[in-house]
Image (cartoon, rainbow, N blue to C red):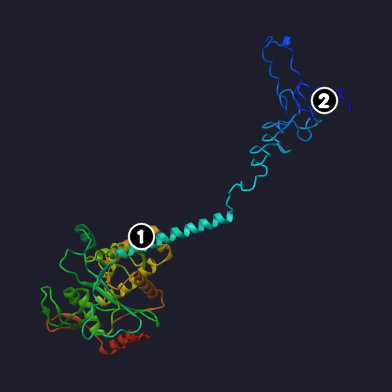
């Protein structure tokens, strides 16, 4: 065996205590040549790439150099150093753990369980949609309870002896009152409503029938001469029944007496009741930016303050209120006014129920606030019932339903006291009332 290289740097042995292998440390300087003087520690040898001081290419792990250490073209390496464990290219790559090219670094291979947790795009989209649906549901439920809290309920559909039996379909009694609730004195002056604050009177009344044979809106003249049933007076004492204008039933006994009067004179059982005053009416129209109407002829009425030109018009709340109240330019006075009321209410329902208004929060919430804030309904009426009411009114205006007035026998009947009242045509009226009760086609009369 050749031993001539023993003790040389890189030889097979190290008489100075170095380990064998691919390289060995140089022998320390004699103390006489130590620049720090005899007895001083020898200066530290410069650390060579890939090994201990003075040990080129030697690994710190037991003296065995890494594969290729000390060979031509091999990469120097040591622990935490380029090419060594924990350093760049410690595994033959460009870096150690956590460094470029190494395990856990960019471009390297991560140990099991150390993969970065990145959500795939499909999952992100799924959870985004789920969150949006939750937000929409919360908003819808909150809006529902808010709107329901705005309703004003009254017990106007109380039972009484001889009340008509329930018929087919659904019958609404819709009342427009002259209530000035919520209006200031200046607003009453501006709207030409007057300042009568004692009680309230019906400015209009209609029966809306919703059934399988189409929806029908029937106006009842407020001057209709009909029997008024006995009812409690303001002092609690009973008031005997009498014959009078149907409008007096509302003025003397409110919605409950009006419902009973309508039911007993028509035989139609009223399933739901809705009443709105001047202020609520104006608020609804203004909340949707006005109502588009086609005016047949110029209208100028000083009593209502209405001044309109013929043609297409967008009526504000103030103009709309004057339009449905004015009658002095009509040849048939109150009957002509009812036709205007039907025409306007149909246009209002059609526009208010449009997707543009229902889906726009800047019109929807003011609309709901104005409509429900002053609306009086029966105790069993809910938001779904009101929704069906609006849709039925929209159908009437859209042509799938019809509108009419109680058949009139004498529009200028003179009472014993000399009043002018309206008498119904008994035969024709009964045919219409029976159609409402039985949900059959409503006959048309010329």
Q: Badge 2 is on which residue?
A: 11
Residue lying at the far bottom in this picture: please name it: 427
Quadrant including the N terminus: top right
Residue at 25 percent of width and 65 percent of height: 278
Place of residue 50 in the rendered image (x, y in percent of width and height, measured from the top left) = 73, 29
Residue 356: quadrant of the picture? bottom left
Which SS class for mark 1? helix
Place of residue 56 in the rendered image (x, y in percent of width and height, measured from the top left) = 76, 26
Residue at 58 percent of width and 54 percent of height: 121
Place of residue 69 in the rendered image (x, y in percent of width and height, measured from the top left) = 78, 32
Total numbered labels: 2
Q: Nearer the viewer, mark 1 or mark 2?
A: 2
Q: Please determine whether, in this image, residue 338 is positioned above or below residue 89.
A: below
Q: Is residue 10 left or right of residue 241?
A: right
Q: Badge 1 is on which residue?
A: 365
Observer-nearest residue: 194 or 352?
A: 352
Place of residue 63 in the rendered image (x, y in percent of width and height, measured from the top left) = 74, 30
């Amino acid at each position: 065996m050749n031993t001539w290289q023993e003790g040389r740097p890189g030889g097979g042995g190290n008489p100075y205590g170095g380990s064998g292998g691919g390289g060995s440390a140089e022998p320390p300087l004699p103390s006489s040549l130590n620049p720090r003087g005899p007895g001083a520690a020898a200066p530290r040898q410069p650390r060579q790439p890939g090994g201990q001081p003075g040990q080129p290419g030697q690994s710190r792990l037991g003296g065995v150099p890494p594969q290729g250490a000390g060979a031509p073209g091999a990469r120097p390496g040591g622990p935490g150093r380029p090419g060594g464990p924990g350093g760049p290219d410690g595994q033959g790559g460009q870096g150690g753990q956590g460094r470029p090219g190494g395990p856990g670094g960019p471009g390297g291979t991560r140990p099991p369980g150390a993969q970065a947790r990145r959500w795939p795009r499909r999952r992100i989209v799924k959870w985004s949609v789920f969150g949006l649906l939750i937000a929409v549901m919360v908003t819808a439920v909150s809006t529902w309870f808010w709107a329901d809290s705005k309703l004003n309920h009254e017990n106007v559909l109380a039972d009484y002896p001889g009340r008509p039996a329930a018929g087919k379909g659904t019958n609404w009694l819709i009342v427009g009152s002259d209530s000035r609730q919520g209006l200031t004195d200046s607003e009453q002056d501006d709207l030409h409503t007057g300042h009568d604050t004692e009680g309230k009177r019906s400015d209009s009344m209609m029966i809306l029938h919703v059934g399988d044979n189409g929806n029908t809106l029937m106006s009842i003249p407020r001057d209709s001469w009909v029997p008024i049933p006995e009812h409690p007076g303001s002092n609690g004492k009973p008031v005997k029944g009498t014959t009078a204008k149907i409008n007096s039933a509302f003025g003397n006994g409110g919605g409950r007496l009006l419902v009973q009067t309508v039911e007993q004179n028509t035989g139609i059982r009223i399933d739901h009741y809705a009443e709105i005053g001047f202020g609520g009416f104006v608020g609804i129209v203004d909340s949707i930016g006005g109502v588009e109407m086609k005016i047949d002829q110029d209208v100028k009425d000083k009593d209502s303050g209405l001044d309109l030109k013929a043609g297409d018009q967008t009526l504000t709340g103030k103009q709309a209120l004057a339009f449905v109240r004015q009658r002095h330019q009509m040849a048939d006075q109150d009957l002509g006014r009812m036709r205007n009321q039907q025409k306007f209410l149909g246009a209002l329902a059609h526009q208010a129920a449009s997707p543009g208004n229902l889906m726009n929060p800047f019109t929807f919430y003011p609309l709901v606030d104005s409509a429900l804030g002053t609306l009086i309904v029966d105790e069993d009426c809910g938001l779904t019932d009101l929704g069906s009411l609006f849709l039925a009114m929209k159908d009437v205006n859209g042509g799938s339903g019809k509108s009419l007035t109680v058949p009139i026998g004498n529009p200028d009947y003179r009472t014993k006291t000399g009043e002018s009242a309206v008498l119904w045509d008994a035969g024709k009226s009964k045919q219409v009332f029976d159609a409402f009760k039985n949900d059959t086609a409503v006959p048309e009369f010329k």
